[in-house]
Amino acid sequence: MGYIQGTNASSKENLEELDDPYSTQSVRQMAMLNHFWIKLESQNLFSLAFSSGKFSEVFGYTACQQISEMLFSIAFFHVSEYILAIIFHGKSNVSLKSLLISKNYLVAMIFSLLEYLVEVYFFPGLKEHWRISNFGLAMVVIGEIIRKLAIITAGRAFTHLIKVYHEEHHELVRHGVYGFVRHPGYSGFLIWSVGTQVMLCNPISTVLFALVVWRFFSQRIPYEEYFLRQFFGSRYDAYAHQVPSGIPFVN
């Protein structure tokens, strides 16, 4: 009987000690938990600081350089297209459509920027290939020059919309850059658009831009040349036989 009471008393004391938040055992357990959380938080903060510092270092130079080149290229391309359209066709005959900004185009550019941001964060080394990036910049410049030479050479004969009716000022241009390819404006845009993605070191968008732009022109050129043959007859047939289209695999 005395043993049972002693056991009950000891158990009661142990239970009271566990229930008491200030008991030695509870304090020891709380101290261990605090030490664990402090250590865990320290590791998280260190990892966060390291990754943020790494991201800031890459984003601070590489991304700012490449994205600024991208935005300038886009702005220059569209503004110059609009200005040249006004110069050759008159402001009254030009609308904002001459900026050549469509919904599909915006979706493509936004996708390319999202790809860039994701890759510069998770694979920052991918954006450090400056030879590739500079090659893309060269493509942008070359493509821009070819397209603008095409517009200036053709003058009023160059339009952003396909002409389905012949006009007096619409002549068959065969000199200048048109002596090398039949559609230098399309060639220039293909080189320019793909170059913007090579410049950003965007592998996915580079392939997609090349495929989508090529497919667009592969369908547009036969449609446009149907009317050009209606306008110029055998003269255009001879020209098409002698000069390539300027788009790969499109006759």
Image (spheres, grey):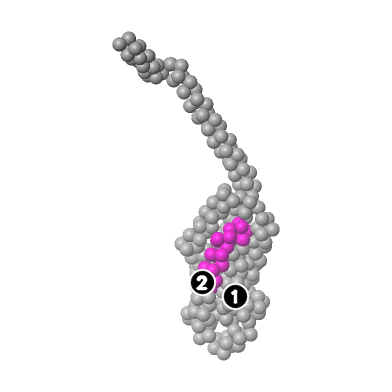
Q: Quadrant of residue 112?
A: bottom right
Say if the magenta span includes residue 98: no
Q: Residue at x 49, y 22 (%)?
A: 31
Q: Quadrant of residue 190?
A: bottom right
Image position of 25 with respect to 236: above or below: above
Q: Position of residue 180 (x, y in %)?
A: 66, 78
Say if the magenta span includes residue 208: yes
Image position of 134 with respect to 189: above or below: above
**Residue at disc 2, secondary structure:** helix
| Residue that label 2 marks | 216
45 vs 242, nearest the viewer: 45
Crowd around label 2: few <14 · some 14–19 · many ≥20 (10 Å): few
Q: Residue at x 66, y 59 (%)?
A: 132
Crowd around label 1: few <14 · some 14–19 · many ≥20 (10 Å): few
- Amino acid carrying mark 2 in the image: Phe
Q: Position of residue 106 (x, y in %)?
A: 49, 59
* Foreground label between 2 and 1: 1
**Residue at disc 1, secondary structure:** loop
What number is the disc on residue 177?
none
| Residue that label 1 marks | 248
User: Does 57 sit left or right of 11 as displayed?
Assistant: right
- Amino acid carrying mark 1 in the image: Pro
> Magenta residues?
197-217
Q: Residue at x 61, y 57 (%)?
A: 201
